[in-house]
Structures are given as C-alpha cells and as structure tokens.
Amino acid sequence: MKKKEKKEKKERKGFFKEFKEFISRGNVFDMAVGIIVGGAFTAIVNALCNNVLKPIVNWFLALILGTDSLEGVYTFLKTAYVADELGNPTTVIDLANSIFIDWGSLINAIINFLLIALILFLIIKVINKVHQMSIAAKENMEEAAQKRREEKEAKEAEEHARLSAENSAEAPAMNHNESAASAAEKSDSETPSAEK
C-alpha cells in the first residue's frame, strides 16, 4: 500500500515538474502573446471591415440593386403572413414562422470573408516587406562593416610594408655609417701610435 502511495506521489511530483517545465519554456509564453495579439488584431480587422469597407460595399450594392443592403434578399420556401386583430392574414410576411433561404446573409458572409482575407493579405504583405527591408539593411550594414575591416587591414598591411621598407633602407645606411665610424675610430687609434 505504502509503495503504491509513494509511487503515486512521485508520479504527481513528476507531472507537476513536467508541467512547470512546459510552462517555463519560451514557447508557451510566445503562444500566449500570439493569442493576445491575435485577438487585438482580429478586433482591428473586424473594425476596418465593418466600419469602413462594408458600408462602401453596401453603398455600391444600393446603387446596383436599389436596396440599402442585402438583408432583405430571401427565397421563401413556405411563406407565413402576420395576422391582423381579426385573425385575417395581411400582406406582411412573418419571418419567424416562414421557411426561407437568406441569400443576403450568405452574400454578406462571403463579402466579409473576402474583405477580411484582403485586409489580412495586405497587412501580411506589408509586414513581409518591412521584414525583407530590415534583412536587406542588416546585410548592407554587415557588408559595409566587412568592407571597413578589409580597408583597415589593407591600410595596416600597407603601413607595415612601408615601415618594413623604411627599416630595411635604414639598416644598410646604419651598417655603412657604423662601418665608417669604426674605420674612423681605427684610423684615429692608429694615428697616435705612429706619432709616438
């Protein structure tokens, strides 16, 4: 019994430890941020579609069809009429009791889908363009930095070669000067001995 309980406790601890590792990974936080940003993004896209583009589309449809919107476009399969106070049917259609196909809602849903898809496409295209521009700018900066490094190395090599050339030119002159000085010293040392 006790072995089973200990095993269950270890499994629970293992489960919570595993859950803690899962939560502490960056992927979960990235996912949470993505969901929050996605919700905000959805609100922006819906507002743009419903408050800007959809009225323009409805205005065009009103020009073409002569109605304010597509809300009243129905195909009735079974029509029910509203009854007056005496119970006689009137010419007013009772939508709650009628069976109909609501073409207007279907067309509005299709238009909404197309508008949202268009807006998302344009936004993603802009984001991709900005991303490509940032990558190109980064590559240009890296190329410029590489070019500066190469120019600096070339200048350093040129300076080193110049200094080496100067040192090698000075070395024979020094040897010549040293040999002349030693010859002069030798002749000076020989001269007094001859006088003695």
Image: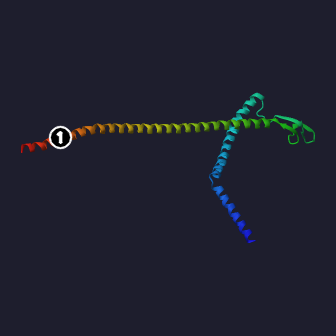
Q: Residue at x 25, y 37 (%)?
A: 173
Label 1 belongs to which residue? 183
Residue 93 picture quarter: top right
Residue 85 lies left or right of residue 62; in this view the side is right
- Quick one: quadrant of the N terminus? bottom right
* Residue 24 in the image: above or below residue 105: below
Please tell me which residue lies in front, 63 or 155: 155
Residue 50 position within the rendered picture, expressed as x and y whole percent measured from the top left: 70, 39
Residue 21 lies left or right of residue 134; in this view the side is right
Q: Residue at x 75, y 31 (%)?
A: 61
Q: Residue at x 30, y 39 (%)?
A: 167
Colour treatment of the image: rainbow
Residue 37 position within the rendered picture, expressed as x and y whole percent measured from the top left: 64, 46
Q: Residue at x 26, y 38 (%)?
A: 172
Hey, which residue is sitting farthest left in the picture?
196
Q: Amino acid at mark 1?
A: Ala
Residue 44 picture quarter: top right
Residue 190 lies left or right of residue 119; in this view the side is left
Instruction: Assess disc 1: are there few (<14), some (14-19) or many (≥20) residues with their C-alpha within 10 Å of its C-alpha.
Output: few
- Quick one: quadrant of the C terminus? top left
Residue 177 position within the rendered picture, expressed as x and y whole percent measured from the top left: 21, 39
Residue 53 picture quarter: top right
Residue 79 lies left or right of residue 11; in this view the side is right
Residue 101 position within the rendered picture, expressed as x and y whole percent measured from the top left: 85, 37
Residue at disc 1, secondary structure = helix
Hey, which residue is sitting farthest top in the picture?
64
* Residue 92 in the image: above or below residue 38: above
Please tell me which residue lies in front, 180 or 55: 180
